[in-house]
Amino acid sequence: MLKTLWAVVRKEKIELLEKENIPEGTRVLVTVLPENDESQFWIETSQISLDTVWNNTEDDVYAQLLKE
């Protein structure tokens, strides 16, 4: 299972920003995000798009079908 976790680098070590139980030796993939206003713009823009897709009344019909 893939899972995205936020972290920061401090003293050349990656520190998770939230508590997560990751077994010793687990392989991880690290993506370095740019530190500037552009990265925040893309994060916020992506969130707006995701909210539009997931929070809409048109999908309510599927929820009703699952109840039946």
Image (cartoon, helix red, strand yellow):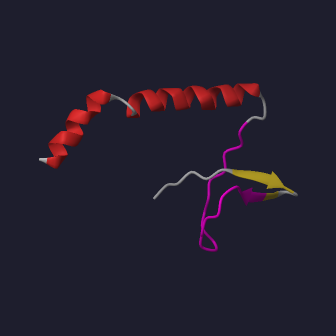
Q: Which residue is depicted at the point 20% across and 34% down? A: 61
Pick the front one: 34 or 56: 56
Pick the front one: 58 or 20: 58
Name the residue furthest right: 11
Q: Is residue 20 above or below residue 7?
A: below
Residue 7, percent from left and from top: 70, 52
Residue 47, percent from left and from top: 54, 32
Name the residue furthest bottom: 24
The answer to whether residue 44 is left or right of residue 39 is left
Name the residue furthest left: 68
- Characterize the magenta stretch by its predominant secondary structure: loop
Residue 62, percent from left and from top: 21, 38
Pick the front one: 42 or 59: 59
Would you say residue 51 sits in the magenta stretch? no
Residue 9, percent from left and from top: 80, 52
The answer to whether residue 5 is left or right of residue 3 is right
Please state the extent of the stretch shown in magenta in the rendering.
14-33
Q: Quadrant of the N terminus?
A: bottom left
Q: Which residue is depicted at the point 17% across and 48% down? A: 67
Pick the front one: 3 or 49: 49
Would you say residue 19 sits in the magenta stretch? yes
Q: Which residue is depicted at the point 27% across and 27% down? A: 58
Q: Is residue 40 above or below residue 23?
A: above
Q: Is residue 30 above or below residue 15?
A: above
Q: How many marks?
A: 0
Q: Which residue is depicted at the point 66% across and 58% down? A: 18
Figure quadrant of residue 44: top right
